[in-house]
Amino acid sequence: MANEDSYNWTHKDLLDTKELSQEDLQHLLDLAAQFQVINKRPVKKVPTLKGKTVILFFVEDSTRTKTSFDVAAKRLSADTFALGRSGSSLNKGESLKDTGLTLQAMNPDVIVIRHSSSGAAEYLAKLLPASIVNGGDGWHAHPTQALLDTFSLRQAWSNNFFGKTLLILGDIAHSRVARSNIQLLRKLGVNIRLCAPRTLLPAGVEHWPVEVYPELASAVRDVDAVMCLRLQLERQQAGLLPDLSEYSRRFCLDQKHLGLAAPDVRVLHPGPMNRGLEIASSVADSPHCLVLDQVAAGVAVRMAVLFLLTQCREGRKNAPD
Ligand code: CP
């Protein structure tokens, strides 16, 4: 447990995993573990954020991130309001700046934003006094996803990260999840392998702190965890993948390939899954797969994030009992 007496969360916003120190990370994950205990009680609501307002500003579609932030805020007794592109004045051409200023005028404590443009969360963070949480911006970052993935692995690995090996498999070029996870898990001493077709590797990957494998059979050998990524067809230019059946033949995580990994290998997927394309249904439904643990972890981690951004600015440090 981080030292409660000397620790101070100093961040107004959560935009990227880059900005988190080891101490921030340790404290946030310890706090999430306390909230996870509360989430398993028959009565899950605590009054910690009573009177606070959290706006969920999701300009891109989401099931997990949006719902779990909503559940997290409500479990802490905050009021939540949701705004998306559909049904809002964004559809009439209102700019991000004017929408942000309009939301700020209602005096929220936290705005969670998901946007298709990299940098949208940082733009609002500089513009507005409210705490901004990046719920995923373009290809850039998805910090709470990386935090919940780390929380899930911490439980699976009994908090022993150093020297473990994680394979990230699939559409890495378009993945904010991969970028945020690599930043966070490297800080904890996890070795990262990447495996993808050449057209789905990011430009400049040779400068990333990872090993790149062109073939799944060699990439998956002896790894402790595999993170499958969704093929993000909506972000891809035409021609990156000529044939989906060829992609799935070479890069789908199936039982045969999983058998080459460590015996107690864990499988993660941020969701939504394309079963049969990047992950076989039998793997998604196997005991190795942490997908639903990741969703549960998402609520606890997002409770910790909302708590730190609001209460710690007011001098409270401990989670409620
Ligand atoms: N992992 C994730 O961001 O899922 P959603 O798009 O459903 O929020």
Image: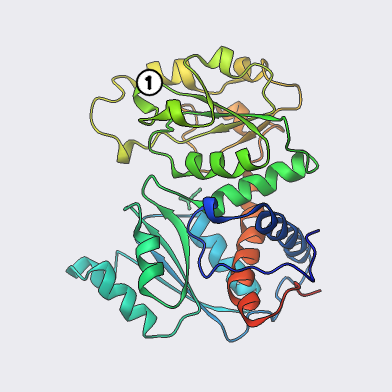
Q: Looking at the picture, tell me which residue is in the foreground, 21 or 152.
A: 21
| Residue 272 in sight here | no
Q: Quadrant of residue 113?
A: bottom left
Which part of the image, by quadrant, shows the N terminus? bottom right
Rendered location of residue 58, percent (x, y): 39, 62
What's the residue at 62%, 28% (across, down)?
A: 283
State whether residue 38 is above or below residue 272: below
What is the three-letter code of the residue carrying label 1?
Arg
Is 144 on the left-hand or right-hand side of 95?
right
State whether residue 225 is above or below residue 22: above
Colouring: rainbow
Rendered location of residue 65, percent (x, y): 51, 57
Element type where label 1 sits in the image: helix
State whether residue 2 is above or below residue 308: above
Which part of the image, by quadrant, shows the C terminus? bottom right
Rendered location of residue 62, percent (x, y): 44, 55
| Residue 187 in sight here | yes
Circle 1 sits on which residue? 198
Q: How many marks?
A: 1
What's the residue at 45%, 49% (across, down)?
A: 141
Q: Looking at the picture, tell me which residue is in the foreground, 295 or 134.
A: 134
Rendered location of residue 299, percent (x, y): 63, 60
Identify the residue at the far left of this view.
93
- Whether disc 1's CB lies below 8 Å from ligand 1 is answered no
How crowded pointer 1 is (Cα within 10 Å; few <14, some 14-19, many 20+) is rated as some
Is 268 on the left-hand or right-hand side of 317?
left
